[in-house]
Structures are given as C-alpha cells and as structure tokens.
Image (cartoon, rainbow, N blue to C red):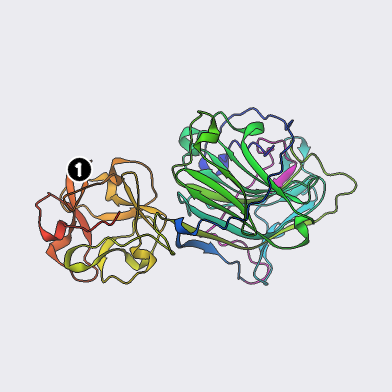
Amino acid sequence: MPRLRPRLARILKVSTAVTVVAAATAFIVASPSTTPPAEAAIGGLTWSDEFNAAAGTPPNSAKWLRETGGGGWGNNELEYYTTSTSNAAHDGQGNMVITARRENPAGYGCWYGSCQYTSARLNTSGRFTQAYGRFEARIKLPRGQGIWPAFWMLGDNIGSVGWPASGEIDIMENVGFEPNTVHGTLHGPGYSGCCGLSGSRTIGSPLADAFHTYTVDWAPDSVTWYLDGVQYSRKTPADAGGNQWVFNHPFFMILNLAVGGNWPGSPNASTVFPQQMLIDYVRVYAWTTGGGGGGLPIVGYGNKCMDVAAANSANGTQIQLWTCNGTNAQQWSRSGSTYRALGKCLDVSGAGTANGTRVQLWDCNGTGAQNWTYTNNQLINPNSGKCLDATGVSSADGTPLQIWDCGGGANQRWNVPF
C-alpha cells in the first residue's frame, strides 16, 4: 500500500515518531469512470509553476523548499535528498527534472551507513498552502525496480498535531514493479500506513513512456482522482469508517523521487541509473460552490463587489470594494460559516475585535476570525460581534473592508446569493 510519510523535521522543526507498516495487501484496480471532472466545483487558477526557467537553474525558491537528509523518511528509503542542481534543475525545455543517481558523495550519511543514492524532494511548505480545489501536475515518470516517484500533499498543521492527524493526500504514486499503475491514497488517523483509503488505475503501457496528467479534485466532502482526465477513484468521509476526516484545512504540496523503501523494495541489477522524473507543470485551482470557473459575486455598497485586491491569493491581501467585473477575485463561495475566494478565507486580521480592524484573505484555519453569519443582509463576525463594513461609507473602487459596530447602514449591507 502507499507509503507512510511521518515527518518533515527539517521543514517544521518537529519530529513525529511512527511505526512503519510493511505493505501486505494487494491493490484492487479500479475500473476507470468516464465521468468528467467536476467542473462546477473548480474556480480560477490560484498557484502554478510552469518550470520555464533556464537550463541548469534550481527550483524557484519563492515557490519550493528543497529538503535534505538520508534518514529513511519513515519508509527505509535509500536515497539522500540534496539541494544540488544535479538532482533537481530546470532543463530549459519547460520541465523541472528530479534525478535519482547511484552515487555515494563524501559527507552524506544515511540510516544504513554510507549513502548509495542521491535524489531531490521539493515542497511548498511556508510558501503556498490551500484547502480544497484542483491540484494537478503533468509528469513523465521514471522507471525501474526500486524507483518511487510521488506527487502528494501534507496538512500544514503537521507541526502541531503530527502525522497522520494532519492528513495526507497522495495525488500520484508509482512503484517500479508496477510500471503501468498509478495509485491515489488518503492517510489519516485510523487509515494510515498500510491501510490508507486507496484506489488505482492500470493502463496498457508504462507510465514512464509518456507524459501523463495526475489530478485530484478536493472538496469538503470528497477527494476524487483522475489520470489524464479520467476519474478512477473517489473517497468520502463514509470511507473512513467512523474515523476522523482530516481534510478540512490547508495542505502543502510535495514532489519527490525516492529510491528503495518498504513498498517498492530496493533496486536490483535490472535498475538503470540515473532515473529522471520530468514535471511539465504544477497548477492549483480554487474550489467554489458555484459553476463555470468560479463562485458568485457578493455585492455591497454602491452596487460594488467584494473583491480580493489585485486578485492576489497571498495571505494578508486586502479585501475591498471594486466595480463588478466577473473575475475570479470576485467569485465567492460559502462552506459552513466561512466565505472563500481564490482558495482562501475571508478573515479578520489578527482575529481583532476593534472597530476598523481590516478584513483580508488568509489560509482557511477554522478560527473565529473566519466565521461569519449572514443576517438581515449583514455579514457578522461572531468573534468580534461586529459587521463587515465599507470604510468611510465609501463606494469608490479600492475602498477597504473592515469590521465595525453593526449600525444597519448601507455600507454594511451585502447581497449574498448563496
């Protein structure tokens, strides 16, 4: 079954001890569905890397963190992950290339002694996280016994709750002894390690023969997997068998190419090195409850729309009034008591309660700063007891939104269509 990935100590400065459970159960190959992706739930592009940099340059450090180490990563893997461009670099042809090599550089120690392999592992922790949406990459996989490429996600709360309580979404995993098969899996408390919630699809030729597109559509009540746009698995809270569904907070993405480990086994005489994993792009789209490419507008004072300034999905981006224009910066959806755009939540800065506290976009985290009730055309933040308010009773483009004592004025009235 898909591997256990218990810790990211060098990212999060934490260590989570887990027991590695060897795979003992064969996968059941799911029959692909011809059902197309659920477009109605998918909004605009919120993050991407097209890997169009010059040949030999490293991953973009504003988007990716390069992990290092040879401790086995909870799976008895054999590689040492480096920051060298010999293991991860742009190829100048629109791809990021992660290369696994058979080598034992001086100074690299692995859990079993002198390291015999090097590779790379990239993630977006501290750079980009998102709850819900479409996560997709176009990848040409490596091949060979003991080779283990993956495109996956971990909950951004792993540093506080540990694994598997943080949750894990494996978008794509492939092991060398199953060259034609992709696996997609959820790991959480009570369904981790050997026993994740998993599905797979097997095609008629090795995945390493060509580029393929690996996708998940993640909604509050489901995760759905696709290979080249064809659905092959879908999991919901009911599949967790009464265990906690932990896929309701932001996650970050990971790309890596492992060598060896409990699931794929070790390389053998048939394994050719170096092996390369070519990533054409990684793209992330928002999740909404609306159709078309987004949610629905929320209209306020002066018939202006609630808008994410400059369509910027970065944490702390000001929420403002702007002339309604149908862009993704004005497409909002509701999930419970939260309001979302561009994959993030409407948030009171610093969970403040004072009049004039700015309202911003922030990673969805379930705190009181992101809870809102809609009553008598007013959006009320119960944490502060105050209303969403257009500053200065102004309807000019760029008027920032704030919280203020509820007074019933026109600048606190909102038309929320859902």
- Residue 297 rendering spot, x and y as whole percentages: 30, 62
Can residue 164 be seen here? The reply is no
Question: In which quadrant is the N terminus drawn?
Answer: top right
Question: Among all residues in the image, which is located at the extreme right?
Answer: 269
Name the residue rendered at 33%, 41% in the picture.
367
Name the residue rendered at 52%, 63% in the picture.
48
Name the residue rendered at 50%, 38% in the picture.
158
User: Mark 1: which amino acid?
Assistant: Ser
Left or right placement of residue 23 versus residue 221 in this view: right
- Residue 219 rendering spot, x and y as whole percentages: 47, 48
Residue under label 1, please give it. 384
Question: Among all residues in the image, which is located at the extreme front?
Answer: 34
Local SS, label 1: loop
Left or right placement of residue 130 versus residue 213 in this view: left
Query: From which residue to which does the magenta span run?
Result: 54-81
Can residue 267 be seen here? The reply is yes
Q: Majority secondary structure of the magenta segment?
A: loop
Q: Is residue 58 magenta?
A: yes
Q: Is residue 348 positioned above or below 4 on the image?
A: below
Name the residue rendered at 16%, 57% in the picture.
413
- Residue 362 rendering spot, x and y as whole percentages: 36, 52
Q: Nearer the viewer, residue 102 or 145?
A: 145
Q: Nearer the viewer, residue 360 or 337?
A: 337
Neighbourhood count class around disc 1 (C-alpha, 10 Å): few under 14, some 14–19, many 20 upward: some
- Residue 80 rendering spot, x and y as whole percentages: 71, 45
Q: Is residue 281 magenta?
A: no
Q: Nearer the viewer, residue 247 or 236?
A: 236
Number of marks drawn: 1
Q: Nearer the viewer, residue 262 or 9?
A: 262
